[in-house]
């Protein structure tokens, strides 16, 4: 008696969004099956893996990072190294130094870094702010202007600044924009509706549905992604069909399990190894739930996660 | 899938004798369909009809017991549709062809801790047999694995050796994982004689389906389906298709829990095994076996499992009490928040990152977020003051500074009135601002 499978191939699909200048472009999304269900129908595009590079440099206390970036002193050099990381398909430059509660670097300095990084790499670029909404708005507008025509992806527009960012970054300078909301399908949809009412084409945006490290309320992330993908595919909800981009590295490396030194928790073993597994395990769960791209830090995580994706195609 | 009244009616003798308490066979059938009465209230139903009905009204996926653990019994594909029922279990897998099998077994107990009321440890041990190894060596390894006292998954395809291994470990809950399209009859006998779960694998999903149907034909419905180790893609496709067939397409032949050995899918690659364990925890693995469970894998994996297998209707809660962070003693400041696990983890994580010693006081606030608990009256000046009194905080802690969440700044005045001698400090609204806030606070008081 043979088994009768019923593949779930939908008449709706996740939007395909291409960012990056011609010659180094990358397309996210586009599939008409549930996340990673390549056995139902070939995926239009595999989920992508990007590398996070901070403008404050990598964490030198992590031996694997120190070895990987050895000799790369400047941020553009580090970005170039990251772009060549096996498995990496894009670079995400995080402007941590802009944080008014931290280094409070000027907008001009940050824009200069972004331009230098852009020139130094041969992969598409994502530029991420510092999480301070006011500063990010100002900063990302200037970044959009400085890189006009380069088709970069900016993270992120929130409820507070989607108008400014949508109007300038997308409509004036032709960049791609990520909408960010707090782990809730309704908030995600509302932001997309507001952006489209502003005239920002859905085809120019992606979503960050929020992220969390495994063990830290990840059920909300997983269920939000499950529900968003179901609505996008089974109900053809155009306001939820944007590809999902999830920053994993910053969450994974900032929980206790990845921060405590071995001396503080000898039983737990190597801190680097804990950080890598936290990053890999969180990323794999995100991809299974629906991320169309994940952003990671460690070369070993990037390699492993991209190999897992390849093995599933 | 619910059975319609009409389908049940067709199976009744249509005597309308009223002995069941219903006026007609049709009325009786309607009640059975609604679940209001049980089919055995009619004394004239044939055994055949009863079997047919209980088969059709049975849950789509069987619950399989291995000792104290339940596997399967799931009803939905996505947790937001209702809830997942049985958390997946993790196993460490050894085989008699490994040089270091005993050393690996010795490491099994290394991970054992509690997280939000749940014990996190390796629940099962897989002992596989390689056909080129002598039988005695396998039985000796089973003997060693037995000493761990955990349920064993015996991976053997030779029925003769399987019987010996099962007999040797009979005091433990067992899964005999070794039935396939060729040996299923002999393996079925070993498993059913011993009353243990039988694991089934096959070269393809078609062959697996066929073999399960044959085993069911032999009367065995105490099964687990091994998704195999041909490739990562096939194993993932198998796990999804099996679950989908049972729950979505009502095909009960595949209504069983699954077994995934990620060590065989990514030999010697601990990072890939971590990635795959996460993939199958998220999508439909019931038992996930790997080479080793170290803390690096355990901390995120068990956390992920605990998250995904909570009932969306019932938030996770931490036990009320005093949680000293960063080596806090009786002189360290106090901070309070609610018992909602997510809030606790985020807040305690940020407090730990600040490096400032803090006594975190968690009271019973109903398991909701700060604002929800406050709105429900479960996190108020009174409840906080009562918690301090009932737990004799003033006797245990000398410091008289209490940080309250920024979102309930309104409680400050009332708390000061309720807790004479205490200085109430309003913390920031967002947890991410806590590190800087605490460092500044500590510096200003140094
Ligand atoms: S007892 Fe059975 S036969 Fe008699 S009325 Fe009820 S259903 Fe019909």
Image (cartoon, helix red, strand yellow):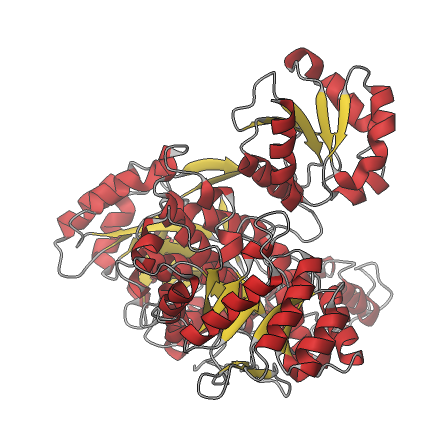
Direction from residue B193 to residue B446 in the image, left or right:
right
Direction from residue A12 to residue B232 in the image, left or right:
left
Say if A221 sits above or below B401 in the image: below
- Corner quadrant of residue A85: bottom left
Q: Out of A126 and A233, give the one closest to the viewer.
A: A126
Query: Can I make out residue B249 in this image?
Result: no
Location of residue B296 in the rendering, given as x and y in whole percent from the top left corner: 39, 47
Direction from residue A5 to residue B43 in the image, left or right:
right
- Corner quadrant of residue B42: bottom right
Location of residue A148 in the rendering, given as x and y in whole percent from the top left corner: 59, 81
Location of residue B125 in the rendering, given as x and y in whole percent from the top left corner: 34, 47
Residue at x 31%, y 59% (from the top left corner): A68
Quadrant in which the N terminus of chain B appears: bottom right
Quadrant in which the C terminus of chain B appears: top right
Location of residue B422 in the rendering, given as x and y in whole percent from the top left corner: 77, 19
Q: Out of A209 and A132, give the one closest to the viewer.
A: A132
Q: Out of A132 and B354, give the one closest to the viewer.
A: A132
Query: Can I make out residue A184 in this image?
Result: yes
């Amino acid at each position: 008696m043979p088994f009768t499978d019923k593949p779930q191939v939908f008449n709706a699909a996740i939007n395909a969004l291409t960012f990056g200048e011609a010659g180094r472009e990358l397309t996210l999304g586009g599939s008409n099956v549930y996340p990673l269900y390549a056995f139902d129908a070939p995926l239009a595009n595999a989920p992508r893996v990007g590398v996070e590079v901070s403008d404050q440099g990598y964490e030198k206390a992590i031996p694997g990072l120190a070895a990987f970036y050895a000799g790369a002193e400047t941020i553009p050099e580090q970005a170039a190294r990251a772009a060549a990381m096996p498995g990496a398909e894009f670079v995400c430059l995080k402007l941590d130094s802009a944080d008014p509660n931290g280094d409070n670097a000027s907008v001009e300095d940050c824009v200069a870094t972004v331009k230098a990084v852009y020139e130094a790499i041969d992969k598409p670029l994502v530029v991420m702010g510092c999480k301070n909404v006011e500063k990010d708005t100002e900063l990302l507008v200037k970044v959009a202007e400085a890189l006009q025509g380069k088709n970069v992806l900016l993270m992120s527009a929130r409820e507070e600044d989607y108008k400014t960012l949508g109007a300038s970054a997308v409509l004036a300078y032709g960049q791609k924009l990520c909408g960010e909301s707090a782990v809730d399908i309704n908030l995600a949809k509302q932001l997309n509706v507001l952006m489209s009412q502003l005239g920002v084409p859905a085809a120019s945006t992606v979503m960050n549905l929020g992220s969390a490290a495994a063990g830290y309320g990840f059920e909300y992330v997983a269920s939000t992604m499950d529900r968003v993908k179901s609505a996008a595919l089974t109900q053809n909800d155009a306001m939820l069909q944007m590809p999902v981009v999830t920053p994993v590295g910053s969450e994974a490396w900032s929980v206790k399990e990845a921060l405590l030194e071995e001396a503080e928790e000898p039983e737990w073993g190597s801190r680097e190894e804990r950080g890598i597994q936290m990053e890999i395990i969180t990323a794999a769960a995100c991809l299974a739930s629906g991320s169309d791209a994940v952003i990671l830090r460690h070369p070993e995580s990037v390699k492993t996660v991209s190999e897992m994706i390849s093995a599933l195609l | 899938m619910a059975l319609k009244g009409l389908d049940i009616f067709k199976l009744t003798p249509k005597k309308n004798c009223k002995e069941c308490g219903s006026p007609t066979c049709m009325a009786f059938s309607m009640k059975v369909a609604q679940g209001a009465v049980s089919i055995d209230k009619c004394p004239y139903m044939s055994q055949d009809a009863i079997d047919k009905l209980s088969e059709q009204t049975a849950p789509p996926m069987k619950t399989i017991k291995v000792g104290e653990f339940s596997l399967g019994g799931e009803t939905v594909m996505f947790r937001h549709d209702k809830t997942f029922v049985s958390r997946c279990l993790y196993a460490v897998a050894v085989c008699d062809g490994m040089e270091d099998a005993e050393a690996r077994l010795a490491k099994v107990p290394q991970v054992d801790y509690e997280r939000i009321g749940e014990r996190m440890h390796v629940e099962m041990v897989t002992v596989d047999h390689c056909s080129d190894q002598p039988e005695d060596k396998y039985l000796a390894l089973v003997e060693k694995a037995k000493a761990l006292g955990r349920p064993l998954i015996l991976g053997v395809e030779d029925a003769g050796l399987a019987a010996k291994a099962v007999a040797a470990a009979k005091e433990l809950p067992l899964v005999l994982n070794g039935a396939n399209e060729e040996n299923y009859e002999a393996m079925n006998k070993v498993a059913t004689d011993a009353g243990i779960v039988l694991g089934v694998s096959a070269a393809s999903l078609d062959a697996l389906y066929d073999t399960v149907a044959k085993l069911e034909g032999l009367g065995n419905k105490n099964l687990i389906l091994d998704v195999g180790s041909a490739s990562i893609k096939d194993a993932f496709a198998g796990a999804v298709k099996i679950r989908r067939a049972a729950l979505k397409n009502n095909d009960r032949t595949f209504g069983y829990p699954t077994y995934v050995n990620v060590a065989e899918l990514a030999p010697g690659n601990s990072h890939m095994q971590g990635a795959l364990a996460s993939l199958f925890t998220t999508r439909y693995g019931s038992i996930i076996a790997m080479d080793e469970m170290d803390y690096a894998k355990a901390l995120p994996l068990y956390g992920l499992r605990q998250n995904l297998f909570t009932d969306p209707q019932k938030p996770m809660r931490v036990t009320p009490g005093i949680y000293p962070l960063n080596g806090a003693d009786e002189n360290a400041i106090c901070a309070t928040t609610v018992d909602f696990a997510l809030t606790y983890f985020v807040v305690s994580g940020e407090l730990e990152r600040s490096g400032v010693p803090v006594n975190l006081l968690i009271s019973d606030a109903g398991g909701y977020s700060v604002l929800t608990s406050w709105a429900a009256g479960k996190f108020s000046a009174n409840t906080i003051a009562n918690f301090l009194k009932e737990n004799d905080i003033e006797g245990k802690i000398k410091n008289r500074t209490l940080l309250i969440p920024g979102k309930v700044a309104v409680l400050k005045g009332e708390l000061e009135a309720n807790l004479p001698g205490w200085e109430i400090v309003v913390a920031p609204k967002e947890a991410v601002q806590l590190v800087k806030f605490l460092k500044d606070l500590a510096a200003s008081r140094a």
